[in-house]
Amino acid sequence: MSTPIRKRRPRRAMNQINVVPYIDVMLVLLVIFMVTAPLTNPGQIELPSVGQSLTAPVLPIEVTIRADRTLALRDRARAGPERELSRAELVKFIQTVQSSAPERPVVIAADKAVRYEAVLDVMDLLQQNQVKRVGLLARPRTQ
């Protein structure tokens, strides 16, 4: 006996999109963003105030050590010529200037031929006499 063969009805084309899985995914992402948003720290930016940006930079007092270990001083604020000083005169002048303007920096510029020891001697002399803000002056290399 043969079994009768049934004919299958052709499937109807589906003309609608099931959006329920997409909504589920979007709700999960929304929950993740809502939980993690308070945990992130926004970048902190420190903006300058108006008073700081309008102040002119303080010009330094420049101490030059020449190859023969003599000292010369140039006050950049007064734009005067460079003058030779002894160690005692140098300390006295810088202390006088810094007593009226304690923010004035002192920079030491030394000739290439000067030994490092001579630069350290001048720095030590200034630090022993409570001179504040002592630094070294260097020229950038040209390429």
Image (tube, grey):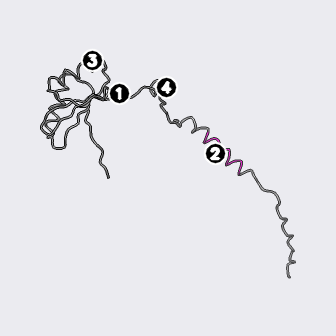
Rounded to the nearest angstrom, the CA distance separating label 3 from label 4 is 27 Å
Q: Is residue 130 left or right of residue 56?
A: left
Tag 3: amino acid:
Ser
Dot 3 falls on a residue whose secondary structure is: helix
Question: Looking at the rendering, which quadrant does residue 65 occupy?
Answer: top left
Residues at marks 3 and 1 touching, judged by CB atoms closer than 8 Å: no
Tag 4: amino acid:
Val
Residue drawn at 19 percent across, 41 percent down: 111
Residue at which label 3 appears: 99
Magenta segment, prevailing SS (helix, strand or loop): helix
Near-viewer residue (76 or 37): 76
Residue at which label 2 appears: 29
Q: Earlier in the sequence, mark 2 or mark 3?
A: 2
Residue at which label 1 appears: 58
Residues at marks 3 and 4 touching, judged by CB atoms closer than 8 Å: no
Residue at which label 4 appears: 50
Tag 2: amino acid:
Leu
Q: Which region is colored magenta?
A: 22-33
Rounded to the nearest angstrom, the CA distance separating label 2 from label 1 is 55 Å
